[in-house]
Amino acid sequence: MNDFIKSVFRNFERKRFRTFLTVLGIAIGVASVVIISDISQCGANAVTGEMDSLGMSGLMITKSIDDTSISLAEQDLKQISGMTQVELATPVLTANTQIMTRDGNTNAILWGVDSNAANIVSLTTVYGRLFSRKDVNTSANVCLVDEELSQKLYSRKNIIGKKIELSYGGSGQEYTVVGIIKTGSGLLQNLIGDYIPTFIYVPYTTVQKVNSRTDFDQIIVKLKPDTNSENTGNLILKRLNASKGTTKAFFSNDLAKQKNGLLNIMNIVTLMLSAVGAVSLLVASLSIMTVMTVSVTERTREIGIKKALGATNAAIMAEFLWEAVLLSVIGSAAGIAVGCGISWLLSLYLHTQFAVRPDIMAIASLFAILSGVIFSVSPALQASRLRPVDALRQD
């Protein structure tokens, strides 16, 4: 075995430039697959984080807009919260608002949430705090804003204690910033930041007070582990309709299912793009066959000498197959390293968390090695079948 390896590396040493080009081709193919899969994974993580920040991780119960006499109220929240399948339920009110500034007004979407909303909606504080029970009970004029809005309004991220004037419900009022929350996704902010609305969070009771309401727009439900979301959603609707004496006054959106559906689509796109990258990998693997064929031609006399000294057909074939394996392994390792490095730099540029797909890297490497070996079988057989007499006659 050691003799095979030494012989292979001696041949690499003699043909450095050709070896370099072959390894480079394989590395480019593997790197392209790795980059595509890693960046796609970063995108999937970004979309997941953005969905979670919007509460897209459970059931959303909403009343029908056709029946204005029906509403979601406090007793409905208690009824849902008391179900054995439900871990947590939180009310949500939404409204379009304007942020009043010296430089003009900025449109935003106001979310009225409870103090327990962070257990369902992804609200991660960078500075300050989340809403307390007291904030909700007293309908306090306090708010949470994200880092992007803080930077936009005051040119810095920490604006705890600052006042922001919000206009909605026909009136404008000042709100004290008590918490700065992490901006959803750096990737999405950089790519489509202009199309992502600005969100401001206030206690839901404050929205009710300003708009003279006692109902909710939605109730977001977090289910206990291993709970069937579809069955539970239907059960919630059945009980709500029964309590109101209606049949179709409410509907349920399985947000987790929608999120998983979107992620499945993204995974399919990732695999399709990776397949495109695999084409370049296949072309690089084909180059191994060309290299092996040329190598057999160049080393015909050497093969004849080895056979004259007692080398078997199997030994000659194994030597050429080892060349293909090592070329593929070195190229795959280099491709993974370069691909991960470029993916990491791109994640820094796009301000998103670096992510890798070990499964795709393993598949790409295995594909490179197997295809390299398969395409080198024919040249290796050609080399092993050379007759010593014929080989030694070659100049």
Image (spheres, rainbow, N blue to C red):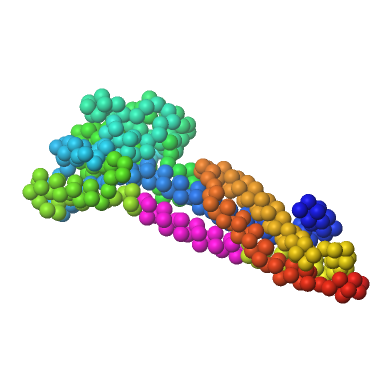
Q: Position of residue 50 (x, y in %)?
A: 40, 45
Give the side of residue 384 with respect to residue 338, left or right: right
Q: Is residue 21 visible?
A: no
Q: Where is the C terminus found, in terms of image quarters?
A: bottom right
Quadrant in the picture for residue 168? top left
Query: Which residue is at the front of the view, 391 or 111?
Result: 391
Q: Residue 265: within the magenta?
A: yes
Residue drawn at (62%, 55%), measured in percent from left and top? 365
Give percent across and percent down for residue 193: 45, 47
Residue 344 visible? The answer is yes
How many badges with numbers are in the image? 0
* Furthest-left residue in this view: 245
Q: Does 252 sit left or right of 386 as displayed?
A: left
Left-right relation of 255 to 38: left
Report the magenta residues as a range. Answer: 259-280
Looking at this view, is 388 or 225 the one in front?
388
x then y, percent, for residue 376: 71, 66
Residue 331 sits above or below residue 286 on the image: above
Q: Residue at x 82, y 63 (%)?
A: 311
Instruction: Please say if 324 is above or below 207.
Output: below
The secondary structure that most of the magenta stretch takes on is helix
Is residue 314 magenta-colored?
no
Q: In which quadrant of the rendered view does residue 52 lie?
A: top left
Tell me which residue sits at (66%, 66%) in the image. 374
Left or right: residue 372 compared with residue 14: left
| Residue at the image point whose x is 20% and y is 51% from the top | 234
Q: Position of residue 357 (x, y in %)?
A: 53, 49
